[in-house]
Image (cartoon, rainbow, N blue to C red):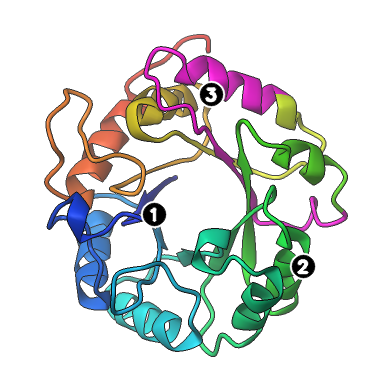
Amino acid sequence: MVQVCLNGVRGAVDGVMVPVSPGAMADAAAEAVAVGATEVHVHPKSPCGDDTLSPRVLAVTLDVIRARVTVPVGVTTGAWAEPEPAVRLERVRGWTVLPDHASVNWHEPGAEEVAAVLLDRGVGVEAGIWSGTDGAARFAVSPLRSKVLRVLAEVTDPDADTAEASARALLAELGTGHCRPVLLHGEDGGAWPVLRLAGRLGLATRMGLEDTLFLPNGERALSNAQLVAEALVQHGCHDGAA
């Protein structure tokens, strides 16, 4: 599985190819799915371009994307979109149109409560476990660890020379006690080395303008679809022992 991550916290300042309006997100999603993306991860944006958990914005975004694609569509619940845990929880409870899944960063305050509400509402939870945080330790003792859709292992090391080692360390920290599928991905300079490692380990991964603005050769990516097409090649082009 290669999930396309359409935009993340990026915005217009990062280039016109980053989709910030619902229509642009839908176009980008359709193009990425057409070249092989099997899921969509998106950050709905407020009119001023900031990430938001607003029920109204989420509903519009999901409806427009789902009119163009039939694959699962997931969203963020990142604390940067709503820093106050109680308000974040209220926002999620107020969603009138539900995503297929939502990422919950386990190191963030209120993560367990947000995940519990999502599960109660029938939304799959991607347990975001970031390297360099206590997310893995918190997840290891979580009563929800066997109920999540998957573990989203997020390697925050942006250095191409060390990201693979950071990814292996994160996977070792996670262990196998959770018994859930793992989606492994990196960011910025570490995005492509970690994606290739995911391919060698037989793990799902993701790629898109949220994680990197550049192709493996250093050229600026023109679209999410271009990144996904290259990711499918990179993810499957290695064999042998990991």
* Residue shown at 71% from the left, 59% from the top: 111
Q: Is residue 218 left or right of residue 105?
A: left
Could you say where residue 222 lies in the image, as x and y percent from the top left? 11, 46
The numbered dot on residue 201 is 3
Q: Residues within 10 Å of mark 1 (few under 14, many from 20)?
A: some
**Element carrying mark 2:** helix
Q: Is residue 198 above or below residue 212?
A: above
Which amino acid lies under the numbered mark 3 shown in the image of this protein? Answer: Leu
Q: CA distance from mark 1 to mark 2?
A: 28 Å
Q: Is residue 189 magenta?
A: no
Q: Is residue 164 magenta?
A: yes
Which amino acid lies under the numbered mark 1 shown in the image of this protein? Answer: Thr
In primary-sequence order, the first of circles 2 and 3 is 2
Q: Nearer the viewer, residue 152 or 39?
A: 152
Question: Of circles 1 and 2, which is in front?
Answer: 2
From the image, tell me which residue sits under label 2.
Answer: 113
Q: Is residue 35 left or right of residue 137?
A: left
**Element carrying mark 1:** loop
From the image, tell me which residue sits under label 1.
Answer: 38
Q: Which residues are magenta?
A: 143-172
* Residue shown at 64% from the left, 50% from the top: 150
Q: Is residue 109 above or below residue 137?
A: below
In primary-sequence order, the first of circles 3 and 1 is 1
Q: Is residue 186 visible?
A: yes
